[in-house]
């Protein structure tokens, strides 16, 4: 159970996300939904490989360090398509560029680069608030409960804020772990528990996304 929660639950959650977006992309024909679909499916493969590598008692940090720039590219692209004003689109582009610059400057990182995830989450949260500002400024007769982007953005806000705190803590405790003596096992367990909490938040978000797809899809089916 511990291995499932700390390693297997993550690729499973991404796979659920990918399946939900695949279904919604088919009926809505939105380019941005296909982008996120491919992102989640690619991420699920990367995380599955990371899980298998860990099970073989070898480092899987390379896979995790590859995931956050891919995340930044996918979400920046998504927001670039849904944001309307020029400065908003430039912000989405800048978020991606900053993350990629950091990634290439730290290509030789051999440990889990939680700071890269902090930078990625910060950019995504900023773009979420920009989108919510755009959404609230636009008067629409359609209720927000019929807007899948609104559902997904709120789910991501929950996940990204929770993950931000976890990634910051993970960065702090990783340095403690590297410099620890007898406390290494205790800190190692703490890092595992932090990642279990992260994976549970991710899984809850995936399940709520499935619910949102089913709920919003009704307006397409009823037409």
Image (cartoon, grey):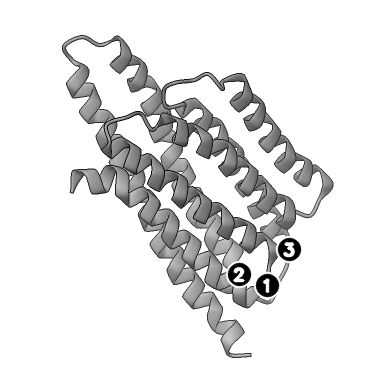
Q: Which mark is residue 25?
A: 2
Q: Residue at x 49, y 61 (%)?
A: 18
Q: Is residue 218 left or right of residue 28?
A: left
Question: Is residue 127 visible to the viewer in this orientation of the structure?
Answer: no
Instruction: Give the residue pinned by disc 3.
Output: 138
Q: Position of residue 151 (x, y in %)?
A: 53, 63
- What is the secondary structure assignment of the residue under circle 1? loop
Alpha-carbon span between mark 2 and mark 3 = 24 Å
Residues 88 and 46: in front is: 46
Q: Residues within 10 Å of mark 3 (few under 14, many from 20)?
A: few
Q: Quadrant of residue 123?
A: top right
Do the CB atoms of the residues marked 2 and 3 lie less than 8 Å apart?
no
For the C terminus, which image quadrant? bottom right
Q: Which mark is residue 29?
A: 1
Q: Which mark is residue 12?
A: none
Q: Residues within 10 Å of mark 2 (few under 14, many from 20)?
A: some
Residues 92 and 61: in front is: 61
Q: Is residue 104 above or below residue 51?
A: above
Q: Is residue 94 left or right of residue 107?
A: right
Q: Is residue 145 left or right of residue 174?
A: right
Q: Position of residue 190 (x, y in %)?
A: 24, 29
Residues 13 and 194: in front is: 13
Alpha-carbon span between mark 1 and mark 2 = 5 Å
Q: Residue at x 41, y 42 (%)?
A: 162
Q: Earlier in the sequence, mark 2 or mark 3?
A: 2
Q: Nearer the viewer, mark 2 or mark 3?
A: 2
Q: Residue at x 56, y 20 (%)?
A: 106
Q: Quadrant of residue 72?
A: top right
Do the CB atoms of the residues marked 1 and 2 lie less than 8 Å apart?
yes
Q: Position of residue 152 (x, y in %)?
A: 54, 60
């Amino acid at each position: 159970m511990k291995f499932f929660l700390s390693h297997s639950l993550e690729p499973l959650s991404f796979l659920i996300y990918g399946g939900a977006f695949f279904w919604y992309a088919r009926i809505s024909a939105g380019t941005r939904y296909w982008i996120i679909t491919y992102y989640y499916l690619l991420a699920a493969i990367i995380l599955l490989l990371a899980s298998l590598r860990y099970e073989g008692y070898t480092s899987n940090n390379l896979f995790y360090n590859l995931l956050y720039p891919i995340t930044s590219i996918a979400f920046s692209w998504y927001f670039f398509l849904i944001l309307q004003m020029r400065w908003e689109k430039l912000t989405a582009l800048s978020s991606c560029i900053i993350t990629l610059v950091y990634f290439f400057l730290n290509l030789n990182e051999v440990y889990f680069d939680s700071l890269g995830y902090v930078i990625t989450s910060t950019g995504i949260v900023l773009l979420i608030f920009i989108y919510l500002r755009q959404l609230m400024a636009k008067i629409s007769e359609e209720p927000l409960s019929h807007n899948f982007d609104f559902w997904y953005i709120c789910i991501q806000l929950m996940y990204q804020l929770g993950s931000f705190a976890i990634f910051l803590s993970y960065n702090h405790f990783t340095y403690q772990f590297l410099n620890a003596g007898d406390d290494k096992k205790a800190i190692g367990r703490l890092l595992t528990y932090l990642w279990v909490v992260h994976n549970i938040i991710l899984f809850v978000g995936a399940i709520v996304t499935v619910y949102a797809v089913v709920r919003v899809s009704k307006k397409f089916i009823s037409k």
